[in-house]
Image (cartoon, coloured by chain):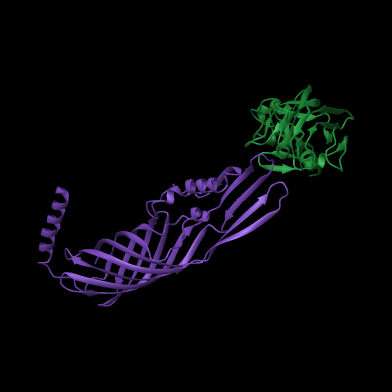
Amino acid sequence: MRINKILVVLLFPLIAEVMISCCDCIDSLIGHYTNKTMIVKNLDNSGPNPLTTTTNSVPKEAFGIRVQLTRERTACLAPPQSFFIQSAYATSCKCPPPNQLFAQDSVVTIQIFTLNDFDPNHPANSDVSDYFKVFEGSTFSTITDFIKKKKTVLYSDDELELDFDVLLMTPPSLNQSHKFKVKITLSDGRILEEMTPSIDLI
Amino acid sequence: MRNIFVTILFFGIYSGHSFCQDSLNYKSKWQTRPNYGINVPITRLLDGGRIPDNLFEYGDHSTYWQVLSVSYFFHKHWGIAINFQGMTGKNISKRAEAFLADMNSEYENNYYVTPSTGASYDNFNPISGNFERGFIGLIYRYEKKRLFIYPKISIGVSSFYTDWGKAILKQKNSNNLIEVSYDSGKRPNDHIIMAASAAFGYKLTKRFYLNTDLMTSYYKTNITFNKKTTDLNTNVSTSESFKYNKKVFTLSIGTGLIFVIR
């Protein structure tokens, strides 16, 4: 009787794998990616949607910055193999996603600095991140919330290019030329920094 | 025209033949009464001009068809009747279109408007129409050889849907974004309805009558649409109410047939 129990315990992993293994799954490709470079552009949101602009001026209530973060695939890992059996002997399918890209490093903070005097409380080189909000579809979120909710596992190479718009929700009190620096701190200690072209916020 | 003439001739001949048989005056127990007519509002539920008017699957001016109507006479003069009417109004299928147009004209001077609504009423049901009402009533009959009148008092339920509507407003030359939404909080709206009616007409045959139906009905509504305006940046909202607390009186005029089942 005792030997039966021991056999059941030993065979349990095999039985479990037979139950959940997949009959016709494509071998999934598992890899990693790293945050590589960043481009920032001025946005004019005076129309129905935010558009990148190279003009010299934008209404100050409709200004924003488009951040384009480029991530690169770093390595591919071999797909996990079944320990006990070939998948052809399985009785059900629970296929993993065909592509899974895990972050090698992640975004820890995104900060926006004004390089010119913004208002009496924010002279040049002040952090004005709180004056900006990330705009997606028809929702706004703070930069901190945006980082928290952004998923780090990607399922397609198309997702390696990350574009997001940060809109200036508190316009400057000074109508003058403005220039901003976007600083992204990554979990591996690297810092990505880019500056927007100068623009008159009128 | 020729078809109408042939039909009238047929009924004339058939009715003449039938009346050679015994009349069923006060003898019939079961009748059914298909009917078609119009509803004319004496008082209106929808004022016209208010944006939430477009979120009602209902029309004050409407047509009705009586898909189910059975009367049972348990006495020479007295009986009970149940009936169910499907109804539609001519602009109900354009409610969504009208809501989008109204939202645009209300806000388009200062905003880029992206409206949406659940009030898409193009899925017309040939049995129940867009909205419906059902009655149970006490019916009295007075019959002569060829003429009859059936007064009736009824109580029932009048039912229609209300829906949501909203718009995202992107302010021109600004990053500001506002959401304006309208919602009554409930979709089906059922109301107790009372009605007094009279059917009168002409007996074409022993079992087949032509009739006209006149009915006045009354019900009271208590519907409130809440207009919520939310600044999507700050999530600060303001609310405004649109009340539809109305006493709705309607005059219905219809015509149809009465078949004596037995």
Figure check: B157 above or below A27: below
Chain A in the picture: what colour? Answer: green
Chain B in the picture: what colour? Answer: purple
Residue A10, x across and y down, in percent? 79, 37
Q: Is residue B260 visible?
A: no
- Residue at 77% in and 34% down: A152
Q: Which quadrant is the C terminus of chain B positioned in? A: bottom left
- Whether residue A8 sits left or right of residue B84 in the image: it is right
- Whether residue A48 sits left or right of residue B72 in the image: it is right
Frontmost residue, B119 versus B155: B119
Frontmost residue, B100 versus A93: B100
- Whether residue B150 sits left or right of residue B52 in the image: it is left
Residue B248, x across and y down, in percent? 43, 67
- Whether residue A159 sits left or right of residue A35 in the image: it is left
- Residue at 53% in and 46% down: B105
Residue A133 lies in what quarter of the image?
A: top right
Frontmost residue, B254 versus A153: B254
Residue B186, x across and y down, in percent? 55, 59
Residue B196, x across and y down, in percent? 35, 72
